[in-house]
Image (tube, grey):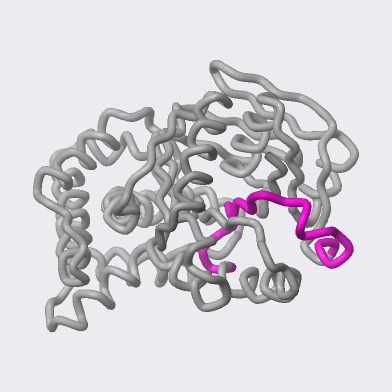
Amino acid sequence: MNILILGAGGVGGYFGARLLQSGHTVAFVARGAHLEALQTEGLHVKHPSFEFAEKIKAFDLQSLADMDAASFDLIILTTKSTATREIAIQLALWLRNQMNPPYILSLQNGVENEAILGDYFAEEYIIGGLTRKIGAHVVKPAHIEAIGTAETILGMMHVSMDNERFLEELALAFKHAGIPTQTTHDIKQELWKKLVINNGVNALCALLRVKTGALFDKSSLSEVVQGLMQETAHAARSLHVKISQEDVDAMFELIKQFDSIKPSMLVDLEQGRALEIEEICGVVIRALHQIGVDAPYTKTIKALLEFNMEQ
């Protein structure tokens, strides 16, 4: 496959390196010092079971205008969810004359990215996705460190015979690249299950400036995590997404047993970047507000984190 990875950060760089080593053609979109280093030094990825250090094709978003969109089979979005709409607008301009545009896969945090993409592209070309059991971060420009298996789940937003065939081919390509992957007919449910984890630990770790493992060392903090997860599940059910108590318990055990990592909000906070607060916490609060239900755990963590950031 010919793949464009838009957002060559930790997850994007890890996936791209795996796919390159598996024989696919991959180009990366990045910016700033990270882009400059990728262009001069190449991409370096270090993982307990995988290492990669090679020259790659990397360029900025504006350079897409000079490239042939028809040459790509797939665009993978691994940017922050805060940038999804802005990027979708630019991609729509680039792809506006394409009779058969590339598929677009979101591997971002949150549950709203696919709907935003649907404002600009036909749903049959949009793939919802998530990856879990991975911690991957840029430790310095062009250098990424990652841990975990990066278990990935993919699903079409609107199924047709052609796109379901492509989805199976993509899942197989990921598996051959060393990325455990499965497909689903209900990707919305899987995205909300990941949000159960994200809302459970992401903002709380950023607020306390601790890795995920610290949340399970004290029962009082574990109870807060459980409260945050229960509110997320309630929000999902309010939108007719089936999240059971068994699902919540499974997500709690998954993150509790996984390696202690710095989740994305904590890394972004340390590096002075914008946080995905609305995309992770806000969506839970808004969904419950629509049915007249409060979200005291999520609202409190969100308010405290925002207050600390203003100081």
Q: Nearer the viewer, residue 234 or 168?
A: 168
Q: Is residue 94 above or below residue 178?
A: below
Q: Nearer the viewer, residue 218 or 136?
A: 136
Q: Going by the picture, which residue comes out furthest to the left? A: 245
Report if residue 10 lies within the magenta region.
no
Q: Going by the picture, which residue comes out furthest to the top? A: 49
Q: Quadrant of the N terminus?
A: top right
Residue 73 lies, in percent from the top left, at: 67, 49
The quarter holding residue 17 reads top right
Residue at left offset 66%, top offset 62%: 101
Q: Is residue 207 visible?
A: yes
Residue 290 lies, in percent from the top left, at: 20, 83
Residue at left offset 66%, top offset 37%: 16
Q: Which residues, given as a range, are shown in magenta? A: 63-83
Q: Relative to 109, is 2 on the left or the right?
A: right
Residue 272 lies, in percent from the top left, at: 60, 59
Report if residue 65 lies within the magenta region.
yes
Residue at left offset 81%, top offset 41%: 38
Q: Relative to 14, is 308 on the left or the right?
A: left
Q: Is residue 200 visible?
A: no
The quarter holding residue 131 reads top left
Residue 27 lies, in percent from the top left, at: 76, 45
Q: Relative to 295, is 95 on the left or the right?
A: right
